[in-house]
Image: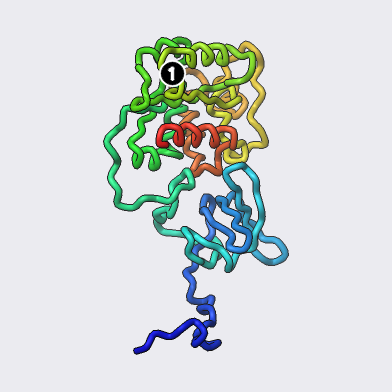
Amino acid sequence: MDRLSYDAWGPAELAAPARTELPVVPVERGLVLEDAETGWVGAVTRVEKSGGMHVMSLEDRNGRSRSFPLGFGFLIDGRPVRVGPPAVRKAPAVPIRTASGSVRVEGMRAQVAKASRIWVEGKHDAELVEKVWGDDLRVEGIVVEPLHGIDGLASAVSDFGPSPQRKLGILVDHLVKGSKESRIVAEAVATPGAAGNVLIVGHPYVDVWQAIKPSTLGIPAWPSVPRGMDWKTGVLKALGWPRSGAEDIGLGWQKLLGAVRTYADLEPSLLGRVEEVIDFLTA
């Protein structure tokens, strides 16, 4: 059969496929979609009825949100879909994207750990990074290690021996101008071998707990903790949760961590810093 030129196609041949042929994807919190008309990409953070129709809010990586009606005109991994109303599922579906919003690499085994590392201040920081970016990091072969405090950061960097083949990306809590943390970081980046091989970034929060959006936890804002009180203990007290010791703090953290499903549940000021570190180590 002769190959037909584009001009040979008639209206019937050029007609777009019937919309009913598109796969229907039930809307759910955390689903990452692209609006075909505007190019807006974001995760579903809220679904509500307005004017007799379902409307969803899509939040991008920078924390900006836009509302869209459910239906046609959306893409998942470049493929058109029709977004349908929420549905009750017997079992959770395998997400099309990872919790960080990256395309899931199906069937790929975790890479052998590379010499480069991500350092974070503590166990909770490591668990949060692992929950949201763990799939990406396993593909890249990057390991996250808790420092259990940064008071000896310069010495730790020196002992690590950074080089172009052995880089460090470090995430620091409460890295604001004039803080103790800022002075520690300044000393660490001056360590021999650190230039070009060590990237230290930070978020403004007293503790990584605050990097979880209050709306994710169903509260209007993080509690204000009085001076002199341990911050985590004060938060648990304000929330009405047990707070008698380290075990209660650990259980409280697990409840907070359990509320996090995707990057959309975290503050943009943390998202950008973690993405910056991963890009630095994998460039």
How packed mark 1 is, by other alpha carbons closer than 10 Å (few <14, some 14-19, many 20 or more), is: many
- Can you say whether 184 is above or below 143 in the image? above
Residue 196: quadrant of the picture: top left
| Residue at (51, 76) in percent of width and height | 20
The percent coordinates of residue 40 (x first, y second) are 60, 55
Taking the image as shown, residue 158 lies to the left or right of residue 244, namely left
The percent coordinates of residue 255 (x first, y second) are 49, 34
- Can you say whether 43 is above or below 73 in the image? above
- Work out whether residue 116 or residue 135 is closer to the camera in this orientation and state it: 116
The percent coordinates of residue 176 (x first, y second) are 62, 20
Specify the amino acid type for callout 1.
Ala
The percent coordinates of residue 6 (x first, y second) are 49, 81
- Can you say whether 180 is above or below 3 in the image? above
Quadrant of the image containing the C terminus: top left
Q: Which residue is mark 1?
A: 194
Taking the image as shown, residue 20 lies to the left or right of residue 46, namely left
| Residue at (34, 89) in percent of width and height | 1
- Work out whether residue 193 or residue 236 is closer to the camera in this orientation and state it: 193
Taking the image as shown, residue 212 lies to the left or right of residue 158, namely right
- Work out whether residue 147 or residue 140 is closer to the camera in this orientation and state it: 140
Residue 157: quadrant of the picture: top left
- In this picture the colour scheme is rainbow
| Residue at (54, 14) in percent of width and height | 186
- Can you say whether 6 is above or below 39 in the image? below
Residue 90: quadrant of the picture: bottom left
Disc 1 is placed on an element classified as loop
Tally of numbered discs: 1
| Residue at (47, 38) in percent of width and height | 258
